[in-house]
């Protein structure tokens, strides 16, 4: 897939812009920045941080994604 056509998609959790291969349209993908899963779709352009509305929900999703990633680094008890 190195030479595949890609489209830009903003992660709904952290706001990072990802370059996603068109072959993944309609499939679940993970953000390389925060690890959040979302559906690869083409949507209207969004500013880097999206709208102010719903910011609490996005912050909660980001915290949940960070907690999930940190569980991999927790020392075994």
Image (cartoon, rainbow, N blue to C red):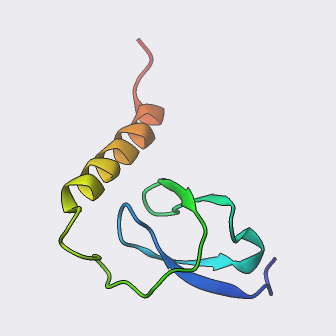
Q: Nearer the viewer, residue 73 or 2?
A: 2
Residue 46 occupies quadrant: bottom left
Q: Nearer the viewer, residue 2 or 64?
A: 64
Residue 55 occupies quadrant: bottom left
| Vertical side of 38 occupied by 18: above or below | below
Position of residue 61 in the picture relative to residue 42 (left or right): left
Q: Nearer the viewer, residue 67 or 8?
A: 8
Q: Residue at x 26, y 48 (%)?
A: 60
**Split into 4 quadrants, where in the image is the N terminus?**
bottom right
**Split into 4 quadrants, where in the image is the C terminus?**
top left
Residue 41 occupies quadrant: bottom right
Q: Nearer the viewer, residue 27 or 32?
A: 27
| Vertical side of 32 occupied by 48: above or below | below
Number of numbered discs present?
0
Position of residue 12 in the picture relative to residue 50 (left or right): right
State the image coordinates of residue 53 (x, y, percent, origin top left): 20, 68
State the image coordinates of residue 24 (x, y, percent, origin top left): 72, 69
State the image coordinates of residue 29 (x, y, percent, origin top left): 62, 59
Q: Residue at x 32, y 85 (%)?
A: 47
State the image coordinates of residue 38 (x, y, percent, origin top left): 53, 58
Q: Residue at x 62, y 85 (%)?
A: 7
Position of residue 1 in the picture relative to residue 36 (left or right): right
Position of residue 30 in the picture relative to residue 27 (left or right): left
């Amino acid at each position: 897939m190195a030479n595949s056509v890609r489209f830009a998609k903003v992660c709904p959790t952290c706001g990072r812009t990802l370059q996603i291969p068109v072959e993944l349209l309609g499939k679940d993908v993970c953000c390389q920045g925060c690890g959040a899963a979302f559906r690869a779709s083409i949507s209207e352009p969004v500013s880097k941080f999206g709208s102010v509305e719903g910011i609490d929900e996005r912050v909660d999703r980001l915290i949940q994604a960070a907690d999930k990633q940190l569980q991999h680094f927790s020392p075994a008890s």
